[in-house]
Amino acid sequence: MKFFQNKLIKGTIILTIAGIITRIIGFFYRVFLAGLLGSELLGIYQLVFPVYGICFTIYGAGIQTAISQITGTVMPKKNQGYASPLKILVSGMALALSLSILLMALVYSSPGWIAEKILLEKSCAPYLKIMALLFPFCSISACISGYYYGIQNASVPAGSQIIEQLSRVLFVYLMCTFAGSGKEFNAIVAVCGLVTGEICGCIFSIVRLFISLHQTESTKTSTGRTRSLHHARGKHPVFKTLLSLSVILTTTKLIVSLLHSAEAVFIPAALQKYGCSPADALSIYGILSGMAMPFILFPSAISNSFAVMLLPSIAQAQAEKNFAKIRKSVTFATKYNLLIGWLCICIFIVFGDEMGTLFFHNTDAGSYIVILSWLCPFLYVSTAFTSIINGMGHTQFTFIITVLSLTLKIYFLVALVPVYGIKAYLAGMLASQVIMAVMEGFYLKNYIAPDSLHWIILPCLFLAFAGSMSYKAYNALLMVIPFTLKIPALFLICVIIIVCYIVFLLASKCISREEFANK
């Protein structure tokens, strides 16, 4: 089919399917963990992720993006003396693995100091020590994923995501079911599950890479092109180029990650200044990060997948000076992320309270979902814009915008949360995300052909009507079904809204099949 000849769309679909599968698994895993650990211990468990995020940024995130971007750039020039994607991968992997081993040693040897001085929570120490073991495996997986994103083949990263998630959940479920002996033990098992999942995902990626390379080598040998290509590859300073770009990207991502981590650490502290007890502050953080945010981020499986595939595609178009392709990609990304965002606002506003109560038995989780629903269109659009701008090579701009956005959020956290509570932080999240999306959109304005009627007005009018009718239908349905069928009923109503929305968009010509074709 012509639809699937477009590598960008095909890769997005593959990653989206994998993302949805892993998020569904991860979502129910979150529900399982919330019941297993309780909101306070869930908050402590969540506090190890800022350290994970900082370390991954240093050894993986920037290098993965660099591999993807450079590979996308050299793909159309592979017969002009440029390095092969494989050589780029090997160089990146050597750098990432060295950094990950160093960071593993640092975190493993001093978890108490990190927990007490950085996270401000001593009880995180044993979890940090275990978590450090996953760094080398994660670095290898990240590099292999970057390689496959660069050649616009999303099947291996998608498979690795699913294997990693399934392995983690299965390990934790079996251990806590058959060997569980209290919440503290369960929390330790949950962190061990992170390590187990990364190891399994890494093994899968390595095996698939070797199979792919063996098949490629056989093809080259049969066509007699191996020698000439090998000679061409030696002309391009791969490691120097990779290191230079990695340093820029890693520095940018590290500063952003540090701000994110500071934000996560300051939330419980700011809530305590507001008047919450330490236990209540950790509980609120656990509810926000472990219950409400997974709902908001669930639909981003589509926008994240599209953004990942966009970066090498834009880098390749930039190298070819194909500005028409860039304009088409930017317009497509803006339009469809907005359409998805409006749909999510509708569903979360109408059913957010019910979701929090049904899945987590927590009314606060429901109210946070409703408030955070307004993030959706700005969050999804900004994700795509950031990837596009990075693919064009303007990483400094995304860095500046991201830092400004996070600085604003931290201001709300430090200055307003101690006075107004957690809702001030939620308002700060929304304000910072809106500013980021608007500024990036303004930067890309020459590449966007907006259509307010079909992108905003018609979809929003339909969703306002559909949301009102579906809410009435759901309440009527609750009167005739038992409590045990509430979740299936809610799921059915949401599916009906989505199907009707897609039909309306097609009928009103807000979207068309031709937009997905490889033109």
Image (spheres, rainbow, N blue to C red):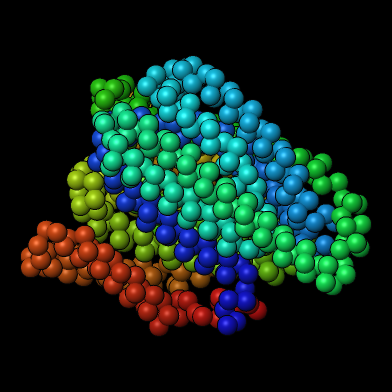
The residue at 45%/73% (across/down) is: 454
The residue at 87%/55% (across/down) is: 233
**Which residue is more in the foreground, 390 or 107?**
107
What is the quadrant of residue 180 in the picture? top left
Any part of residue 285 in sight = no
What is the quadrant of residue 456 in the picture? bottom left
Expressed as whole percent of the image width and height from the top left, the position of residue 280 reads 25, 28
Expressed as whole percent of the image width and height from the top left, the position of residue 394 reads 69, 49
Expressed as whole percent of the image width and height from the top left, the position of residue 236 reads 87, 50
Q: Could you tell whether 195 is left or right of 275 in the image?
A: right
**Which residue is more in the foreground, 411 or 341?**
341
Up-down: is 365 above or below 261? below
Q: Could you tell whether 102 is left or right of 425 in the image?
A: right
The residue at 44%/72% (across/down) is: 453
Quadrant where the C terminus sits is bottom right
Expressed as whole percent of the image width and height from the top left, the position of residue 379 reads 46, 52
Q: Given the current orientation, which residue lies at the most extreme front position?
A: 178
Up-down: is 495 above or below 366? below
Q: Given the current orientation, which residue lies at the most extreme left position?
A: 479
Up-down: is 167 above or below 195? below
